[in-house]
Amino acid sequence: MILKIVDENNSTIGAVQVYENNENGELCVQDTYHIKEVSDNFDSVFGTNEAELVVIIDITEFKENCLIAGEVYHEFEDSNDEDFYHNCIESICNKLEVGVGPIPDRVYVIWSIIEEEYL
């Protein structure tokens, strides 16, 4: 099962891929996306004996990414299509103070916010 966590604008904040191991309901977290921590316990909400996952998300970086995405989009929204992507990626790298070397994944996360929210 995939639990996708989105904000009110349908932007993905995080996700957890969970697999139920057996008929006893034991859960295994297989993968996470932008999740700070996942812990398992028994149901503390409804009082059942079901397994419960607690997902902790650090939304500080997500909020910062959204702010950067908005700033960068508005900075280049009037540029032609050929230059738009290059200008945006360069500006994001500058804002994140990316030096020489490979472009970090966070740059592409911010670009995906621009694509989802503004294009």
Image (cartoon, grey):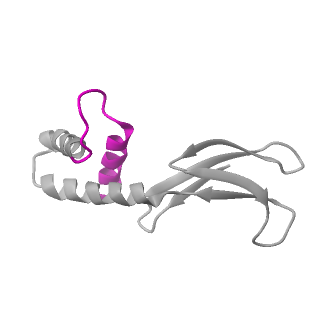
Which of these two is toward me, 101 or 78? 101
Q: Which percent across, then down, holds residue 36?
A: 55, 51
User: Residue at horizontal 81%, vertical 42%?
Assistant: 21
Which of these two is toward me, 108 or 38? 38
Left or right of residue 89: residue 41: right
Residue furthest to the left: 79
Q: Which percent across, then down, holds residue 6?
A: 49, 61
User: Residue at horizontal 24%, vertical 42%?
Assistant: 97
Residue 102 magenta: yes
Q: Which percent across, then down, holds residue 100?
A: 23, 28
User: Residue at horizontal 23%, vertical 33%?
Assistant: 99
Left or right of residue 4: residue 22: right
Image quarter for residue 8? bottom left
- Image height of 70 relative to 93, above or below: below
Residue furthest to the top: 101
Left or right of residue 9: residue 107: left
Which of these two is toward me, 56 or 6? 56
Q: Which residues are magenta?
A: 95-119
